[in-house]
Amino acid sequence: MEETQRTRAHIETPYEAMVREFEEETGVKFEVWECYAICEDKRKEITMYCYRIFDNRISECKTMTDEVIKVCSPPAVIALGPPHTLSNIPFLMAMALDKNIIGAQVTVNLDHS
């Protein structure tokens, strides 16, 4: 009941949800994230907010579930591409590494037909 009342009193922003989820999944709380891109699929009414942080405390992250965490260098993930990663991951990681990109607006089409 308390969670419902709290949720009704305050709807999380995408930023707040990302900070909370990252901490829940890794056990580490980072509070100075930067939104480097907002991707929208207007036909499906989907918006994805992309955040990044450059912080040496990333080594403190650990799984808080039975899921396995695998740390990969960004260039290795970018080079993998599909079918080894989701199709948008290499593109988004390349954008995340470019510190000149801040608040980019990206319109995407998630249909592959």
Image (cartoon, rainbow, N blue to C red):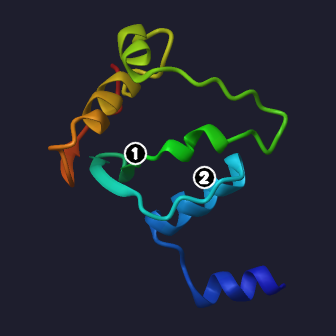
Above or below, 53 relative to 78:
below
Q: Position of residue 29 (x, y in %)?
A: 61, 59
Quarter of the image that includes the C terminus: top left
55 to the left or right of 4 = left
| Residue sitting at x 68%, y 46% | 26
| Residue sitting at x 65%, y 54% | 28
Name the one closer to the observer, 81 or 73.
73
Q: CA distance from mark 2 to mark 1?
A: 14 Å
Above or below, 33 relative to 59:
below
Q: Which residue corresponds to mark 2?
A: 22
Q: Amino acid at mark 2?
A: Phe
| Residue sitting at x 72%, y 52% | 27
Q: Which residue corresponds to mark 1?
A: 54
Crowd around label 2: few <14 · some 14–19 · many ≥20 (10 Å): some
Query: What label does residue 88 carry, if any?
Result: none
**Residue furthest left in the image:** 100
Judge whether residue 63 can be spotted in this image.
Answer: yes
Quarter of the image that includes the N terminus: bottom right
Element type at marker 1? loop
| Residue sitting at x 36%, y 53% | 47
Element type at marker 2? helix
**Residue furthest front in the image:** 56
Q: Amino acid at mark 1?
A: Phe
Q: Position of residue 52 (x, y in %)?
A: 39, 47
